[in-house]
Amino acid sequence: MEMNPELELAERIVVKTGANLFLSGRAGTGKTTFLHHLRETCQKRFMVLAPTGVAAVNARGSTIHSVFQFPFSPYLPGKGFIGERIEHFRYSANKRKLLASIDLLIIDEISMVRPDVLDAIDGILRRFRRSVRPFGGVQLLMIGDLRQLAPVVRADEMSILKEFYPTPYFYESHALKESGFVSIELQKIYRQSDPGFIGLLNEVRDGCPSNSALALLNERFDSFQTKSVPDGSIRLTTHNSSASRINDGRLAELAGDEIVFESEVSGVFPDYAYPVDYYLHLKKGAQVMFVRNDTGENRRYYNGMIATVVELSAEKVIVRPVGSDIDINVEKAEWENLRYVVNEDDGSVEQVVDGVFRQYPLRLAWAITIHKSQGLTFDNAVIDASSSFAPGQVYVALSRCRSLEGLFLSSRIGRESILVDRSINGFMDECERFRPDEGEMCRLEKDYSRRCLADLFEFCETDRLLNGFLRTVDELVIPIYPDVKQLKNNCEVSFANDIVAVSERFVGRYVSESVTCYFENGLPEGLSDRIKNGCNYFVGELDKISEILLQIPLKTDNKIYTKKLKRSFDALIFSISFKRNLLSSMAVADFCASSYISARSKALVDAESGIRSSSEKKKKRKERAEKDCSGVKKEKKPKGYSIRITFDLYKEGRTLEEIAESRSLTLNTVAKHMAEVVKNGEIELNELVPEELIAEIGRIMTVTDSDMRKARFGDLRDVFPDYLITLVCNARTGAAPADAE
């Protein structure tokens, strides 16, 4: 792509800093081209997201809502999504790994993204990256033009959101304000070359056209009235119904048979993301438009090229572009519905194809809506914008044309038709001050390198997990194995003194303004060796901690407690393994931001692979233990087997307390077993619990007020043990009500 100073600065910010960037620019300034360039050259682990399905397909990315599994209801800071359902956030292991490992999040068409969506993204990234930084420390590249496409917000949604956000635009995001961002507005326009026309468009874009600009613009209405419109012109309308009516009417006027081409969809490809209509209706002589660029070597067509169908059959579509005498035999094109995953082998972020949409890359093109013309360029267009209803709509329509001479108005445009949201004016003016100069760029680059170095020697997450595990050991293990207390104390003291304290001293001494510089110019003298020595030191200390941890028994006299203990232990070991892998890599590599980012990604995947390998070994050991001496694997116990054992013991005359003790189960578990026996009709409930308890719970269950019901259950616990209450509730309803828990 052709670079200019603004694009070069934008690339430098994305590649060499961790600063968030809002990249804006007028229509035709190369925002989309820059996105495609970055996709091919950026070494950071990134995802490309967009607010709509069509925008995501065009950007070869995914939608925000599909990646983060958001519902479409508004998100309220500190409260969550309205009507939120928990299944939205049950992320797969690969999705959690993906969100934890990305460095850069690219959001195209950011002008259409509401601020609450950004704040929801912030919450998820902080959660899965276990970070207090805005967006979990992920860098944002936000691309779009606030003067073109605005967020779509219903009145009822805005009435809810206005309590938290003054306007519906992305820059009101609380997380974005906390993190800050820099801004670059692309200046060089590639679509138009006439300075007069560019100046006219700028006045319309700003919503303040002069009288002379309006007069010049409306001369194109006079030309439409007095001159013939060139062949191949397309009409831009404000409403979809108008465009459909024009296309259907012109198609019906043509002689000959109509052929309908049905799209082919395989895999998962939601209908809201279809790049063209599912059914393509064509006749010979129809005016059509290509809806994507030719990916072949000859590049015969481009997105927005107008052509006429010259030959047509059920198996063949041949078109002739306007102004050309060379026909194009059009082949069907494929659009992919892509999903981001982490490659388990090398830890890279890659895209996999979930579904494919296959159809001729054409649409009828006597008319098109202004919205669907976004990103296209036309030599000749008739614009009907008198019924514009959205801010920026007139500007989008006019800016599709290469020249003023190719622009025709079917109705005059007055000031009332040029709608602009004045609330963004202050922000746009502010953006001028957000553009970094050379001094600011050097500071951002140094800060990014310092942050990467600080992250390398930061152990907050491991410290948090270790403290949690040791608390669990204190509670569940030491009462059974008193000798473990010394191991626990040794581990606690060693980690605090030999790892946390040392890392804090290292970061305080070396990761400061006085000793760091932009790392591409070389580390300060001696610091590179100190970093490698530090990495080796912490690898050794982590190994010592691991040796102590492996001596702590992970078995208790209660299965539930044992599971809790092992879960805490596994999370801690994963964190130690990840940190150890990262430090080992950087102990042999020259430190710079890019080497750190690469090592971090690989360390994350290696740690996951180690946990998975360990789990597989445990599974095999368990299978071996389940085999008898003949080598035949024992049959899996049937469903309800444990309940039958409990009931058999009861029939032998044992009490529920004795059954729980002999089977190493909790009393609540035994109570639930007996509740199942009651429901099966094998025993009466009043044989197990007093009649007055059954009667009282029956009365409580009829109370409609939840607070009162909860209070009544609380009073009941003063008289009867919890496990009997659990037994009655489960026998009556199948599960204890929330008020009884």
Image (cartoon, grey):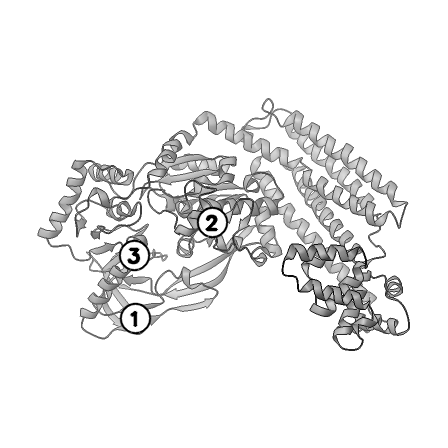
**Residue found at the very far bottom of the displayed protein:** 681
Q: Is residue 315 visible?
A: yes
In percent of width and height, residue 53 lies at: 42, 56
Q: Amino acid at mark 1?
A: Lys
Specify which label sits upstream in the sequence, 1 or 2. Answer: 2
Residue under pointer 3? 301
Badge 2: how crowded within 10 Å, few (<14), some, or many (20+)? Answer: many
Q: Amino acid at mark 2?
A: Val
Badge 1: how crowded within 10 Å, few (<14), some, or many (20+)? Answer: few
Residue 467, by quadrant, is: top right
Is the residue 121 above or below the residue 460 in the image? below
In percent of width and height, residue 417 lies at: 23, 46
Q: Name the foreground residue: 112 vs 717.
A: 717
Residue under pointer 1? 316
With 551 as the anchor, is 119 left or right in this view?
A: left
Residue 78, by quadrant, is: top right
Q: Secondary structure at mark 2?
A: strand
Specify which label sits upstream in the sequence, 1 or 3. Answer: 3
> Which quadrant: the C terminus?
bottom right
> Which quadrant: the N terminus?
top left
Residue under pointer 2? 48
Q: Amino acid at mark 3?
A: Tyr
